[in-house]
Image (cartoon, helix red, strand yellow):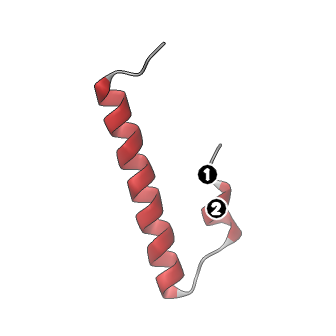
C-alpha cells in the first residue's frame, strides 16, 4: 500500500532530524554506534 503524502513527509522529517542529530553528535565528537544502529530498524 503506497504511503500517503502526509506519511511520506513525516518519514522525511524523521530522517532529516536523525541526520541532524548524527551530524551534531559528530560535530561534538560524541558519535556512537547507537546513533547509526537506529538506521534501517
Binning the other alpha carbons within 10 Å of mark 1 as few (below 14), some (14 to 19) or many (20 upward) gives: few
Which residue carries the number 2 mark?
36
Residue 10, by quadrant, is: top left
Which residue carries the number 1 mark?
39
In the rendered view, does 17 fall on the left or right side of 35? Answer: left
Which quarter shows the C terminus? top right
Q: Which mark is residue 15?
A: none
In the rendered view, does 5 fall on the left or right side of 16? Answer: left
Binning the other alpha carbons within 10 Å of mark 2 as few (below 14), some (14 to 19) or many (20 upward) gives: few
Location of residue 12 in the rendering, given as x and y in whole percent from the top left corner: 38, 44
Alpha-carbon span between mark 1 and mark 2? 6 Å
Up-down relation of residue 28 to residue 11 (above or below):
below
SS at mark 2 in the image? helix
Residue at 41%, 22% in the rendered image: 3
In the rendered view, does 6 fall on the left or right side of 16? Answer: left
SS at mark 1 in the image? loop
Residue 37, by quadrant, is: bottom right
The reply to whether the C-beta atoms of the residues labelled 1 and 2 are less than 8 Å apart is yes
Amino acid at each position: 500500500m503506497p504511503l500517503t503524502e502526509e506519511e511520506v513527509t513525516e518519514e522525511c522529517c524523521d530522517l532529516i532530524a536523525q541526520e541532524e542529530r548524527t551530524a551534531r553528535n559528530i560535530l561534538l565528537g560524541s558519535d556512537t554506534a547507537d546513533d547509526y544502529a537506529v538506521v534501517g530498524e
